[in-house]
Structures are given as C-alpha cells and as structure tokens.
Amino acid sequence: MSHSLLLLPGDGIGTEIMVEVEKIIAWTNGEGLTDFSTDHGLVGGAAFDKHQVAVTEEDVEKAKAADAVIFGAVGGPKWDDVPYEHRPEAALLRLRKELGVFANLRPAICYPALAEASSLKRELIEGLDILIVRELTGGVYFGEPKQITDLGNGQKRAVDTQVYETYEIDRIARVAFDLARTRSGKVHSADKKNVMKSGVLWDEVVRSVARDYPDVEFHHILADNAAMQLVRNPKQFDVMVTDNLFGDILSDAAAMLTGSLGMLPSASLGAPDPVTGKRKAFYEPVHGSAPDIAGKGIANPIAMIASFAMALRYSFGLVELAGKVEAAIAAVLGDGLRTADIGESNRKTIGTEEMGAAILSKL
Ligand code: ATP
Ligand code: MG
C-alpha cells in the first residue's frame, strides 16, 4: 500500500541532511520494501523568504494529510529580525500544535563504537538504550495564567502555571506502556509529587494505567532523583515517561550520554485516529539548523536518518527495516567512519554525503 511522506527540510543543515534521507527512501522504494510517495514543503526561513510566513496554510494542510512528516531543522542568523510571529521556530510550534502530537519520543542509544571513544566511563554507557517519553502539548509551557505583572514598587511578579488533566496523563502513559511492551518491558514515571499537585495527579493516573499492563514492570521516581540516576547508573532505565518540563531537561541529560547532538533522532506522535487507528506523526533530529557549519557539507546526517528509521518503526510498522537502517548506522561507525562532530583527534573525518553513502552501501 502506498504511504505519503511530507519532507520539510527547512534551513541550514536541514536541507543537507534531508538529501541523504531521500536517497534511502529511493532505495527502500527501489527494493520494493516500501511504496512511499514523497512531497516537499518549505518551512522556517526558507518559507519566510518565499512567502513571508514560517509555514504556509497549504503546507500545514499537507502535513495533516500526510502519513508522516519528516522535518529537518529551522532557523539561522539571517532571520533574526523577522517579525516574532513569523520567526522560523514558529513553523515547528504551529505544526506540532496542528498535528496534535502530544507524545515526544527521545531515544538515547549509545552505539558500541562510540562508547569506546567516549570520555565517560565505558561500563556506564556501553549498550545504553533509553527511551524518554515526554508529554509535549501541556504542562507549564502552556498553562494559564502565564504572565509578568508590574507590582508598581519596583517589583514584578512572574507566574507560570502547571496544568494537567487526567486525559492528558492517561494518553501519554499508555504510549509509554505500549512502547515498553515492544522493548524490555519497564517503565519509570518521573514527577515531583512531593511538592506539586500536578505530580500527585500524574502519579495517580500513571499508576492506574499501569494496572492495565501487569506484564510491564512499573517504577515511580522523583524527577530530581531521575536526573541523578541518569548520570550515576543510566542503564537501569528502559522507558521513562514524564511531563513537558521534566522531559525537556531529562531527555537532554540522557542525550549527552550518547555522544553528539548529530546522532539523536526524535518522534512526536498524536492520538490514534478513531477509525483508522493511525497516529499523526512528526519525525525530526534533536539538533537545530547548525548555522555555524551550514553549507560546508560536514553535518552529520545520522540523527536525520535515524529519525526516518523511527518513522519506519512507529508510523509504518516496518520494524525489521527500521532495525536494518539502525544496524547500518552502527556498522558504519564500527568501520571507524566519523563526521567531524563525532571525530576523534587521530582519525580522518568524512562529510555528509560520504556518511550518507556509507550507510546506504551497508544497506
Ligand atoms: P536550536 O535552537 O535550533 O536548537 P542550537 O543553536 O541550539 O539550535 P544546533 O543548531 O543544534 O543548536 O547546533 C549546536 C551545535 O551542534 C553547533 O555547533 C552545531 O554545529 C552542532 N551540530 C548540531 N547538529 C549537528 C550535526 N547534525 N552535525 C554536526 N554538528 C552538529
Ligand atoms: Mg538548542
């Protein structure tokens, strides 16, 4: 069956690394392993230059209609002075909101070849494979009131509000438990129920979801302890589910155990459609548009390619093919090939195109 992909390369290295994904799509289609139709759109600065907005209505509609959106990166100094509502990052927020992608999946995987060269203790990170499931559309990022008030006596008061409702916690918890079933079957839920009411509700709802998954091992952990344990003994974790703010922080901490920003993929999933069961989905590398290296042909395409592998797994159920793409990445690293961001001082590095070609030739 044919599936549609909307490719949104964006700005900076986004365009360079998307090219490498397109080559892989051409290969999977060519081998008869997939039947993807692809369409392209402009986002971020690229869209602003042509249409004076960060993303056009037409492309928003295309994103909603596509089976999956593959997004590169947006932004750069060229657009520092564009009106706030049209700044490149606005495209990302708009698309996330329109697609309703409330579950942000951030894997932290340590490839064996990189564990060897890491400055971290090898036994700490070798074989590391954590999946952080971050709630993406609620919590303190969106709760009202959210304001700074002038108190008049040279003092101001700032207020952010953390709000969660049962349904929001229930649906993110189910995503985490479902994913745990496809992995090693363990979920940690991180909150601050010792000081926050939203944490009390979070824990109550996650625990009740846990009862529907007796086959999954469930642990509660306070978010500050989770941060400490991620640094002390990260391999104790499999799936970690947490709210928007803690997820932001804990996923960045977990990410840095693995090496470079250039290695890290992500997926954002929406609710299953009541009729088709299909989820809206948005795949992007964790890193940004890297203006400092844009146009030089040296960006690491692995985060982008690994994001595409997540699309194969989570949007199309092509688990084996996703595993093959990930194995090709591991194999290339095992051969000693490195882009500059993951390079070691005594090793020659290769560019974006060569890395893409090496992964393709493993496939
Ligand atoms: P954003 O605000 O979009 O997250 P940022 O400036 O915080 O952007 P990045 O654009 O991700 O972060 O860049 C941070 C650093 O990491 C830069 O020095 C950049 O060159 C490097 N970097 C990011 N992604 C890659 C990549 N794929 N390959 C090589 N280097 C990268
Ligand atoms: Mg950043």
Image (cartoon, rainbow, N blue to C red):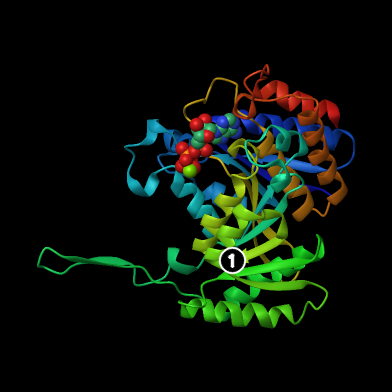
Q: Is residue 273 above or below residue 104?
A: below
Q: Is residue 362 above or below residue 84?
A: above
Residue nearer the viewer, 2 or 92: 92
Q: Residue at x 59, y 66 (%)?
A: 242
Q: Residue at x 40, y 39 (%)?
A: 52
Q: Which residue is mark 1?
A: 242
Q: Is residue 195 left or right of residue 349?
A: left
Q: Is residue 99 visible?
A: no
How far across and down, in percent of the image, does residue 230 sit? 61, 56
- Most extreme residue toward the right is 32
How far across and down, in percent of the image, does residue 8 sit? 59, 40
In terms of secondary structure, where does tag 1 sit? Answer: strand
Q: Is residue 173 above or below residue 57?
A: below
Q: Is residue 158 left or right of residue 229?
A: left
Q: Residue at x 48, y 34 (%)?
A: 46
How far across and down, in percent of the image, does residue 359 sit? 78, 29
Q: Is residue 321 left or right of residue 285?
A: right
Q: Mark 1: which amino acid?
A: Thr
Q: Residue at x 78, y 51 (%)?
A: 313
How far across and down, in percent of the image, does residue 196 sit? 46, 77
Q: Is residue 48 left or right of residue 63?
A: left
